[in-house]
Amino acid sequence: MSDTPTLTPDLFLEIADHTLLSSDTTAAQLDAFLADAESIGVKRVCVLPTLLPVDKRGREIVTVVGFPSGAHKAEVKAAETVQAVADGADEIDMVVNLGLVRAGQWSAVEHEIRAVREACPGLVLKVILESAALSDDEIVATCEAAEAAGADFVMTSTGLHPSGGASVHAVRLMSQTVGDRLGVKASGGIRDAATAREMWAAGATRFGVSATAAILESFSSFNSSNGAAQQTDESGAGY
């Protein structure tokens, strides 16, 4: 993608969702995380819906729905979304029902995404595929269902599925499927600038990361012209 601008630290800060999704997060840990986000300078943070509402401190708030399994009825995901919106969420990251995807029940997949879409009018909606657990055909069809249902982004993974997190191949395939009509959020095991730039070159337009500070620090040592590409950490440690 020769016309793609270089992913700089400043641009990364604009398109990174700084993430805290540990289920045992305490109020004190949340406060420390939000203070850290303010210090780093990220535009958005992503936290569990049970932690909302929060003091935004000038950040946009992303939260998750149907997280992490996606094995919830469409009506439950929609209700969770309504509550998240009422609690101040600015963006919604929903996990698709993998059982429906594996069964090829594309009308049902589209239905549940549309149910969440209708529950958060005007907000950015991202659909988490768990791409590492899917075949290429399943990735393409899920992206098509997300687009048909009105989603704004497709997203690689929760970072918690045993199959792994983001891959360059999945990001490229998702980007080729949705074109410039939807965004592509790469998440799951992205730990350094080299990996982020690989994902960016493959078509990622947003990142979900917990290692934000480490990634920013690694930009200074990464040579974009001849640095060796590093492998994505797919250890399942979250975004």
Image (cartoon, helix red, strand yellow):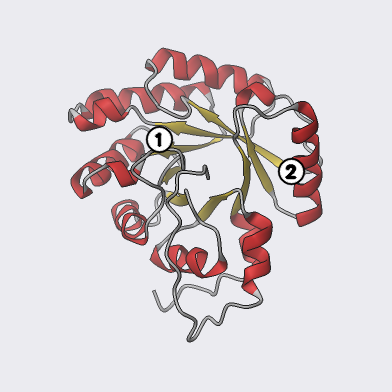
Q: Nearer the viewer, residue 78 or 195?
A: 195
- Per the image, label 1 sits on a secondary structure element best described as loop
Residue annotated with mark 1: 150
Q: Quadrant of residue 149?
A: top left
Q: Residue at x 62, y 62 (%)?
A: 215
Q: Judge from the rendering whether residue 85 lies leftward or rightward of residue 184; answer left or right.
A: right
Q: Give whichever of 210, 180 is nearer the camera.
A: 210
Residue at point 38%, 17% (across, down): 74
Q: Is residue 181 left or right of residue 63?
A: left
Secondary structure at badge 2 equals: loop
Q: Which residue is mark 2?
A: 59
The local crowd at label 1, few if under 14, some if 14 to 19, many if 20 or more residues have their Cα within 10 Å, is some
Residue at left offset 59%, top offset 55%: 15
What residue is rendered at 80% in x and 31% in y?
A: 28
* Label 1 vs label 2, nearer the camera: 2
Q: Where's residue 200, x and y in %? A: 47, 64
192 and 186: which is toward the camera? 192
Q: In x, y percent, where is residue 141?
A: 23, 41
Q: Is 75 placed above or below 51 here?
A: above
As displayed, is residue 103 above or below residue 128?
A: above
Is 173 drawn above or below residue 76 in the view shown? below
Badge 2 density bin: few <14, some 14–19, many ≥20, Cα 10 Å:
some
Q: Earlier in the sequence, mark 1 or mark 2?
A: 2
List x then y, in percent, for residue 32.
80, 40
